[in-house]
Amino acid sequence: MPNFRSVLIPAPKSRFIRVRCNQCGNEQIIFDHATVEVRCLVCGNLLARPTGGRAEVLGTVVRVLD
């Protein structure tokens, strides 16, 4: 019988990221595999565009959250 503690569980490749809007400076948390366009909650500027996999982030990535 195999030792189940030694079996590695793969980590997910998707993460949440904190992005700063280039126009107004607002920071918000988005999913890096977004399937819809993500807009800034303050000014409405486009922050992320879906590409079929990982989203194209148009703002500045401030931090990757674990």
Image (tube, rainbow, N blue to C red):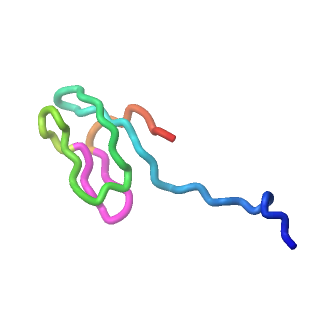
The x, y position of residue 45, in whole percent, is 15, 40
The x, y position of residue 59, in whole percent, is 27, 38
* Side of 37 where 34 appears, left or right: right
Task: Judge by depth and name the residue closer to the eye, 52 or 29.
Answer: 29
The x, y position of residue 34, in whole percent, is 32, 55
Q: Image quarter for residue 3?
A: bottom right
Q: Residue at x 17, y 30 (%)?
A: 23
Q: Is residue 34 above or below residue 1?
A: above
Please check the rendered image and state whether residue 49 is part of the magenta-colored stretch, yes or no. Answer: yes
The x, y position of residue 5, in whole percent, is 79, 58
Q: Residue at x 21, y 53 (%)?
A: 37
Stretch of the chain drawn in magenta: 47-57
Farthest bottom residue in view: 1
* Side of 26 where 29 appears, left or right: right
* Side of 6 where 14 appears, left or right: left
Farthest left residue in view: 43
Q: Residue at x 47, y 38 (%)?
A: 65
Tally of marks:
0
Q: Image quarter for residue 33?
A: bottom left
The quadrant of the picture occupied by the N terminus is bottom right
* Side of 10 where 41 appears, left or right: left
Q: Is residue 13 above or below residue 44?
A: below
Please check the rendered image and state whether residue 46 is part of the magenta-colored stretch, yes or no. Answer: no
Farthest right residue in view: 1
Q: Residue at x 34, y 39 (%)?
A: 29
